[in-house]
Image (cartoon, grey):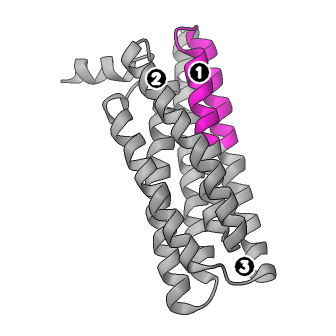
Amino acid sequence: MSTCCAQQRNFEGLSADYKRRLWIVIALNAGMFAIEMTAGQMARSQALQADALDFFGDALTYGISLAVIGRSLQLRSSAAMAKGFSLFLMGVWVFGSTVYHVFVIGVPQAQVMGVIGLLALLTNVASVLLLVRYKDGDANVRSVWLCSRNDAIGNIAVMAAALGVWGTATGWPDLIVAAIMAGLFLSSAFQIIMQAIAERRALAV
């Protein structure tokens, strides 16, 4: 069993099936970024815009991951580390801008949040199902899985925020959900960066 797990963890993405799935997921994420960012601005929902930003980050992440497949371990780990730092910055931005929006702009529109949140959730569930077979691997491959998982969790949270905004008529549920999503970004960033560092150390030995 341990040998099997080690082989999965060392998977580098050198699979035609994996690449095809990545292309499909890139298209899904790019499309949802445009839809959700527009809806988030219309609804004044920072949780929706945070989730849209996550879609954009994922599409970019998947594109980078696709580009470095088959390259040297040093290049793959460097790409993973760059993606980890971008997730960290994304988490900080999401939390800071959410605080500003809740206290300055006002209460978001719960109905739009709910409808777009459901559409985004369906998109992310499809992405997760496409990639679950390849959830383990090197830092580059694992970063793809973590981003997909974040999206699915994030959309469930956005729908919960929509229900909370509707029930309380305040922006606090939106703030809480966006803060949770920011924490998820930071946690994923830490995991990706630490695995990339470990791979670089192993390469130096």
Where is residue 30? Give x, y as percent: 61, 41
**Labelled pair 1, 2 in contact (Cβ < 8 Å):** yes
Viewer-side residue, 184 vs 154: 154
List x then y, in percent, for residue 44: 71, 73
Dot 2 crowding, Cα within 10 Å, few <14, some 14–19, many 20+: many
- Residue sticking out furthest to the right: 104
Q: Is residue 191 left or right of residue 4?
A: right
Q: Residue furthest bottom?
A: 168
Quadrant where the C terminus sits is top right
Q: Are marks 3 and 1 in contact (CB under 8 Å)?
A: no
Mark 1 and mark 2: span between their CA atoms?
8 Å
From this view, report whether residue 164 is shown above or below residue 82: below
Q: Is residue 80 above or below residue 125?
A: above
CA distance separating discs 3 and 2? 39 Å
Residue stretch rendered in magenta on the structure: 57-86
Total marks placed: 3
Q: Give residue 116's position: percent from left, percent from top.
A: 53, 63
Dividing the picture into quadrants, the one containing residue 38 is bottom right
Amino acid bearing label 2: Asp
Q: Residues within 10 Å of mark 1 (few under 14, many from 20)?
A: many
Pinpoint residue 69: horizontal percent, then vertical percent. 53, 14
> Which residue appears at 49% of the width and 90% of the height?
167
Residue 102, label in figure: 3
Whether 112 is among the magenta residues is: no
Give the quadrant of residue 103.
bottom right
Q: Amino acid at mark 1?
A: Ser
Question: Which secondary structure, mark 1?
Answer: helix
Element type at mark 2? loop
